[in-house]
Amino acid sequence: MSEVPELDAVEETPVWLEVNGVPAVTWMCTPEQLDELVVGWLHGEGYVERAEDIVRMRPCTRELGFWVDVPPERFETVEAQDRRRVLASGCGAVTTILGSLASLPRRTGSVPEVDLARMRALFKELFARGERYKETGGVHAAALTDGETLLHHAEDIGRHNAVDKVIGACILEGRNPRDLILLVTGRISGELAFKAARAQLSLVATPSVPSTMAVEIARAAGMTLVGRAVSGHPQWWSTRAGVSAR
């Protein structure tokens, strides 16, 4: 009898989160770097700015899930915001929550110079680190960089989850993600751009392209987007003068 080949399926599982005793989100995700996923999501939603804002974080011992407590005033501020639940375009997600553009912080830092040759080298390193991608070809990846080295890297079935993981890793390390550069392997969707804008990242780059909503969000936040970043003809979007490429 011939041996049945092993299927190259990518792992996907639900992970839930309750914040201050209220069900907040259930991710369909790759079950690794879950602490980072939780902290990155909390930051993106405005519940925390630093790791010290988390009063308590406790994993469930029976299934994949977390209970998190944040200061009541932060919880009440987020819950009072004008936010809407939408069907997300990201892989592995059912719904996400988007706030109004007026709620986004506006970047005041300098506009980064886009070193395209270095960015292509960083993307090459990002792809080389992708163990799950090499195994299955079925995941997305994200990385935070200062423009010179990759600081944090994550893979997930959902690109927005990968973004939460690298932002969460940055915060757990005690570093503010503000003004860093985000590299993603898939398109820059609206929900992904919203997370990046909330973190006040300076630039988001992809080998793919952004959506029109992502461009609108980036312009509202003063954030730069770079599409087709590994090609010979990249495209970038910014509302601010002085964006350059070399």
Image: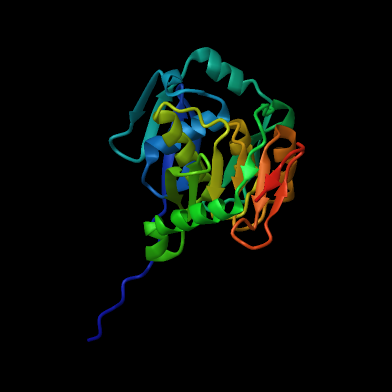
Q: Position of residue 82 (x, y in %)?
A: 69, 26
Q: Residue 15: x, y in percent?
A: 41, 42
Q: Which residue is farthest bottom?
A: 1
Residue 77 on image: x %, y %: 60, 18
Seen in the image, is 92 located left or right of residue 221?
Answer: left
> Which residue is outermost to the top?
73
Does any portion of residue 117 appear in the rendered image? yes
For the N terminus, the image quarter is bottom left
Q: Nearer the viewer, residue 233 or 178?
A: 233
Q: Residue furthest left?
A: 1
* Image quadrant assignment for residue 209: bottom right
Q: Nearer the viewer, residue 120 or 162?
A: 120
What residue is rendered at 60% in x and 49% in y? 115
Closer to the camera, 15 or 62?
A: 15
Residue at the image point whose x is 77% and y is 37% from the top:
241
- Give the quarter of the image for residue 203: top right
Q: Where's residue 167, x and y in %?
A: 48, 36
Above or below, 246 against 69 in this view is below
The answer, for residue 93, to whether it is visible in the render is no
Give the camera-side residue of 38 and 61: 38
Q: Is residue 153 left or right of residue 116?
A: left
Question: At x 50% / y 36%, what residue is drawn?
Answer: 25
Q: Residue furthest front?
A: 246
- Quarter of image, res 243: top right
